Image (cartoon, rainbow, N blue to C red):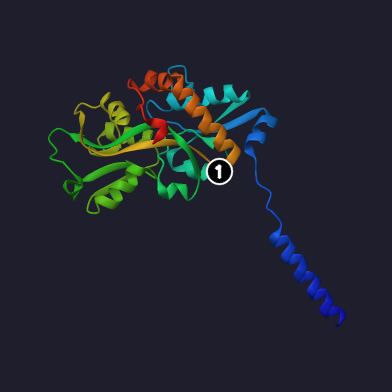
Amino acid sequence: MTLTGLLKVAAAAAALWVAAAPVAQADSLDDIKAAKKVRIAVAMGVPLFAFVDDKLQPTGSDVETAKMIAKDLGVELELVQITNAARVPTIQTRKADFLVADLAITDERKKAVDFTIPYATLSIVVAAPAGEAIKDYPDLAGKRIGVTRATVNDTLVTQNAKDADIVRFEDDATLITAAVSGQVDIVSTQAAVVAEMNKNRTEKLETKFVQRELNLGIALPKGETALKTWLDDWIKTHFADGSLNATFKKFHDRDLPPDLVTR
């Protein structure tokens, strides 16, 4: 065999060896502990879950849950404040270690990120003034309805109310402003957001129908097995001792479902 032929064989063998070699897996849990800091993303502007209080400080059930997690990890918390639309991209690009941001566990999202077991729930509803005769999706035909972009709300209305005039807003805060100012009188959102709208609306909105009850999970990058296991165990522990429910009830005035962690 010529020298050129031998070099080709050697190169091919080297390529096969590299392909067969095990790929080093990331271990964010060790990295977090080594850095003594955890970056947790929250979607700000979501009533009850993550919002700014009268002292201009972030608060809400998601924010307080993030603080509890950081404390139990024994590290400093860096709160990464994002919009709803940025939730999955933030985890995919690892701009945060994980995300506690009222993100519903769906099959489509599972293709992009990993989820823990549920840590909370929410109901998605269609709400409108009392005079609107709306009982289901077909009744939205030709009607103007506001949704927050890149949410399950957006997906459900898009799929089931194809003849509706759908107006998409970048976050819940903008949707609330639009509903209060009269830009939209029909919305697809969660009950807590509707309550926030009604604080400043003359013509109150009422729930017309419940679209879906959603399980919310902590989202993290694909393949972070150790971190996911730690977070799953953390949720089970704090659900069992009542502290997770207490934090949720403080803001939402309701208990978490008794079967939450087995869903």
Q: Quadrant of residue 85?
A: top left
Q: How many marks?
A: 1
Q: Residues within 10 Å of mark 1 (few under 14, many from 20)?
A: many
88 shown above or below 128 = below
**Towards the viewer: 26 or 161:** 26
Q: Which residue is mark 1?
A: 221
Decide if residue 89 is in sight here: yes
Q: Quadrant of the C terminus?
A: top left
**Identity of the amino acid at label 1?**
Pro
Q: Secondary structure at mark 1?
A: loop
Given the current orientation, which residue lies at the most extreme right position?
3
Rendering coords of residue 195 (x, y %) = 28, 26
Residue at 71% x, 57% y is 21
Rendering coords of residue 6 (x, y %) = 84, 76
Rendering coords of residue 145 (x, y %) = 25, 43
**Left of 163 or right of it: where is 38?**
right
171 shown above or below 195 = below
Residue at 14% x, 38% y is 132
72 shown above or below 22 = above
Q: Quadrant of the N terminus?
A: bottom right
Rendering coords of residue 171 (x, y %) = 39, 38
Residue at 24% x, 27% y is 201
146 shown above or below 192 = below
**Towards the viewer: 45 or 184:** 45
